[in-house]
Image (cartoon, rainbow, N blue to C red):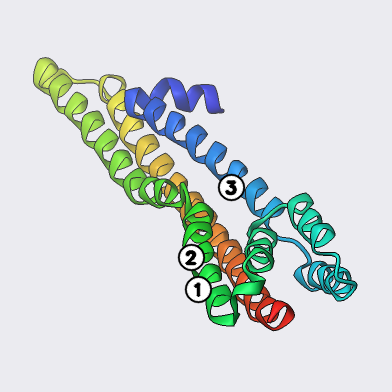
Amino acid sequence: MLPILLAKGGLMMWVLLLMSAVGIAIFVERLLHYHRAQINSAEFLNGVRTVLRKGNVVEALSICEATPGPVARMVKTAIINRERGKDVVREALEEAGLVEVPRLEEKLNILATMAQIAPLMGFFGTVLGFIKVFARLEQAGLYAHVSQLSAGIWEGLICTAFGLGTAILFYAAYNYLVGRVNEVVLDMEKASTEVIHLVG
């Protein structure tokens, strides 16, 4: 079925297909990134707390370096600045958060843009298809056969359907990833509050 749709969908169908491939690649990359970024922050902080109570700062920093994700990097920042007072630790954590959040949100704007323009590209393909229909009508005049017009109509309908379908999937993917970002940011905020008391 897909080869038939590609054959009848025209140039815009291929553009939409290429855009879909890029969107899927971005979604998978971000999904893996968030999977690595989200850790069990309570368990991680308990481990760091236990080590710090023994006065082993080097081991605590090693745990942070060995653990992936923004929570571990923020805790490391707090430990490094621990002797400079709570206010300095709080400022350092805020600065670290300003660095980490854009990293989490990276490429999401591309996915959102694709979700917005996919229907427009589909409609553009529809317009191109109907231009072909009217060009053939003009050439054939009253003797136009349905087979001469069907190619343009096929192109128009396929492009519209594919554009709308792509937009729906990209919107769903974008909203899901935004939800994952919010979960990681919430973990960062909780960890920041706890680590200030931990090193203070």
Q: Earlier in the sequence, mark 3 or mark 2?
A: 3
Mark number, residue 91: 1
What residue would you read off at disc 2?
95
Q: Closer to the camera, 168 or 9?
A: 168
Vertical placement of residue 74 versus 148, above or below: below
Secondary structure under the numbered disc 1 in the rendered image:
helix
Q: Secondary structure at mark 3?
A: helix
Give left or right: position of 96 versus 198: left
Distance CA(mark 3)–CA(mark 2): 23 Å
- Residue 194 is situated, as x and y percent measured from the top left of the image, at 70, 80
Q: Is residue 70 left or right of residue 41?
A: left
Type of amino acid under label 1: Glu
Q: Nearer the viewer, mark 3 or mark 2?
A: 2
Q: Which residue is mark 3?
A: 30
- Secondary element type, mark 2: helix
Q: Are marks 2 and 1 in contact (CB under 8 Å)?
A: yes
Q: Nearer the viewer, mark 1 or mark 3?
A: 1
Q: Residue at point 59% right, 74% down? A: 84
Q: 19 or 194: which is nearer to us?
A: 194
**Label 1: few (<14), some or many (≥20) within 10 Å?**
few
**Residue in the picture at 87% in, 68% down:** 51
Above or below: residue 199 compared with residue 75 = below
Amino acid carrying mark 3 in the image: Arg
